[in-house]
Structures are given as structure tokens and as C-alpha cells.
Amino acid sequence: MKLELVSCSSSVELIKSLPSEMVLEVLPHICFTFIIEGISRACSHQLVRHRVASYSQQSQRYVEVKNLDKHIVVPRSIEEKSRDIFMEYVTTAAKVYETLVKYGISKEDARFVLPNATETNLILTMDGKELFHFFGLRCCYRAQWEIKTLADLMLSKVREVEPKLFNKAGPYCFQLGYCPEGRFSCGRIKEVQKKYETL
Amino acid sequence: MKPSKLFRLLLEAPEKTSHLLRRIETHHGSILEHNRLYWILEADDSEVLNVLLCNRFFTFTKIDESKWLMSANLRSVVELHKVCRSEFSSKLVESLAEVAPNIYNSIKGGKNEVGVG
């Protein structure tokens, strides 16, 4: 996974235009644009559920997938316990995909055999308010590992450029001071809060 | 080509890639969404409501009785002008001349070639 923060609107000038008690009102106005490369399609499916954002994702209709075995995301659990059977499936999927394309099947149809592990690249733009919500859900210890890794990386990048505005951004237990997950809580609120104070 | 490589190319040699840049900007509505623009606006509540009724993707923060911080992405500006052409939308388009010349020229040229769909 590779993440780059390629553009962001500085809050400095915008905050100057607002009364001092309205500083946080700047959040829905400021935007951050990231290039995200090498995440799985499984991860991007979760990402695009955050609808208050703009996405430009690499097409599988127009871009042919080549060397699938080198462009997949392998979860650690599979890497450790059953890499062989996983790679066997990936190799078969790649062969079927290539054969279908060779038979003249369009890429948009041939891609139906590609696994969720297939890497994808995208450009994402999200405003500050939505980022707080995104971090609240996806930095949580209960979030799926790949999108959590991505959310943590995004938070680090955002804090580099807007440290004051985003020092309280993180999982909801860090933002709110309590865990809203109820009986699903990881029960590690102190540990989580300590981590996100210094991320 | 990976987006990061394309981004570097556009950044390092904009003159060489201007044709590509123009094609991307004017043919892919979703690309426009990655650009956000800001204005300080003098308007009353009903005028702001009218803008929001035309396009709900504009964001407003009330600064005082008649002053607003307004922001929107480039696609919303283009759509507002296409759908609810008005003196207000024309003024917004004028403000694109410097920051988004390709889009501005496409709109002013009347070719209606900026793809927002």
C-alpha cells in the first residue's frame, strides 16, 4: 500500500475569514486529496461507502490486469497459514482471465473472475468533517485491518499539514472520550487513546 | 500508468502534458471534483437557499448577517452554471479564469464539452 497526500487546502486563510469561536466551522470547507495505490478491491469497496468524498478509481473495464500474482494483496493470516492454496487460486484466476481476454471477451466481462485481492489505485478527495467521521470509524480497533492501516496512514499525513485541527482526530473513543461500540467494544480504550495522542 | 506517476509528470512538465491535462479535465467530470474553490459571499438567507436548491453540494458557513464563507468543488460550479444559468453562476465561472483556465475556456467557448456526467 502506498499513500501520498498530493493536495490540501490550507486552513490558515479560511480561519482568518471566520470569527475566532467558529474555527471548527472550517472543517467542511477544507479538502485533502490522496493518491492511494496498491490496496485491494476489498478495501476500496469499504472505502467508497464513505459517500461524502470524491473518488477516481483505476478502471478494470479499460485497463487490462497483467501479472495478477504480483498485483494482489495477501492478508497476513493467509500469508502465514495457507499461502499456497491462495496463490493456487490466484494463478488459476489469472489464467482464466487471460484466456477470456484472448478469446475476445471484453475486459469488463473478463474481470468477473478476478479476486477481491486484486490491487487497485485511486485518487480520493475528502473534506475535513468527513475525514473526522472516517477516522472515527476506520481507525477503530474493530475496523478491518487493511482499511485501518490506510486510515492510520491518512491521519498521519493530515496531522502533518494540519496538526492543530486534527489533533483530536482518531477513532471515536479518542474523539468522544468513550467507546460508542457498546458490547462490541475492544475494551482497550486507554491503550487506543494513548496511541492516537502521539500518532 | 499509476496515478502517482501521472501526477509527477503533470507537476514536472505541465507544458508537455498540457494536452493530456486538458483532456482529463474536460472529459472526466469526476476529476473536477478533486478541486475545491472558496469565496466570501455577500447574500441574504434566501439567496443562499436558492443556490442550495440548485446544487446541494455547495457548502456555506454564515460569518455574519449577510456574509458567508462558501466553497464548492469545480464540478458543482460547472453543473450549477449548466443547470441554473444565472448572473451568480456567471460570476462564479468568471472566477475560474485564473485557477481553472481549461474549464473556463471550455465554458466560455460555448462548446459545452466539459463532461460532468
Image (cartoon, rainbow, N blue to C red):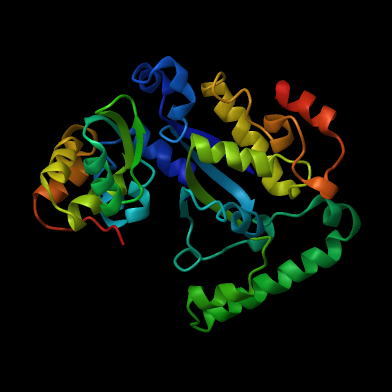
> Residue B106: x percent and y percent?
15, 50
**Is A56 positioned to the left or the right of A66 in the image?**
left
> Residue B64: x percent and y percent?
30, 24
Toward the viewer: B33 or A56?
B33
Instruction: Name the residue: 58% across, 29% down.
Output: A157
Toward the viewer: A65 or A36?
A36
Instruction: Name the residue: 53% across, 79% down.
Output: A102
So how many labels did they put on this image? 0
Toward the viewer: A10 or A99?
A10
**Is A71 positioned to the left or the right of A143 in the image?**
left
Toward the viewer: B62 or B93?
B62
Q: Quadrant of residue A149?
A: top right
> Residue B81: x percent and y percent?
18, 51
Q: Quadrant of residue A70?
A: bottom right
Residue farthest toward the bottom in the current orientation of the protein: A103
Instruction: Name the residue: 51% across, 37% down.
Output: A129
Image vertical order of residue A71 relative to residue B8, above or below? below
Image vertical order of residue A166 relative to residue B21, above or below? above
Which quarter of the figure is the C terminus of chain B placed in?
bottom left
Q: Would residue A134 be seen by someone viewing this image from the given angle?
A: yes
Instruction: Name the residue: 59% across, 41% down.
Output: A133
Q: Would residue B20 be seen by someone viewing this image from the given angle?
A: no
Image vertical order of residue B29 relative to residue B65, above or below? below
> Residue B56: x percent and y percent?
34, 50
Image vertical order of residue A41 relative to residue A140, above or below? below
